[in-house]
Image (cartoon, helix red, strand yellow):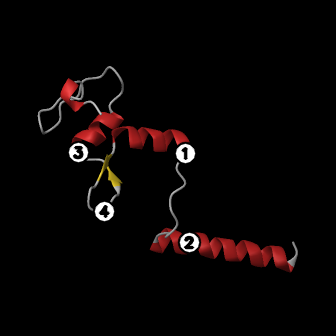
Amino acid sequence: MAAASVEAAVSSAVGEVKDALLGSTSDPQLSLQTKEAFLKHARKDDESGEWYLGEDDFVDAITPEGENFVGRTGRSSMDPGNAC
């Protein structure tokens, strides 16, 4: 293995370990399908403009279609008032 290849591999490994230990500042690379599923259930914060999922929004997002889940709030994921 050439010295340049070894140096590149070590540099890459150091970067990956650093990211694993300290966290990464780069944005996650979400698939289009994941992003669409998030935005389907997300709400936009009026002050910050950021999108987020509340507790019921999250439950609705992860509950399979046709399933009924009642969380702590007592609202069913099948309630018409729970639709986005």
Q: Nearer the viewer, mark 1 or mark 4?
A: 4
The answer to whether the residue labelled 4 contacts the one labelled 2, judged by CB atoms less than 8 Å apart, is: no
Q: Which residue is mark 1?
A: 31
Q: Earlier in the sequence, mark 1 or mark 4?
A: 1
Residue at point 70% right, 76% down?
10
Residue type at numbered disc 2: Val
Which comes before the other along the chain, label 4 or label 3?
A: 4
Q: CA distance from mark 1 to mark 4?
A: 24 Å
Pointer 3 residue? 55
Quadrant of the drawing holding the N terminus: bottom right
Q: Nearer the viewer, mark 4 or mark 2?
A: 4
* Label number found at residue 17: 2
The amino acid at mark 1 is Ser
49 horizontally vs 56: left or right? right
Quick one: 83 or 28, which is closer to the camera? 83
Q: Dot 2 lies on which element?
A: helix
Amino acid of disc 3 = Glu
Q: CA distance from mark 1 to mark 3?
A: 23 Å
Marked residue nearer the N-terminal end (4 or 2): 2
* Element on which disc 3 rests: helix
Q: Look at the picture and state if 56 lies above or below 18.
A: above
Q: Residues within 10 Å of mark 3 (few under 14, many from 20)?
A: few
The x, y position of residue 36, in whole percent, is 46, 40
Q: Secondary structure at mark 1?
A: loop
Q: Tag on residue 48?
A: 4
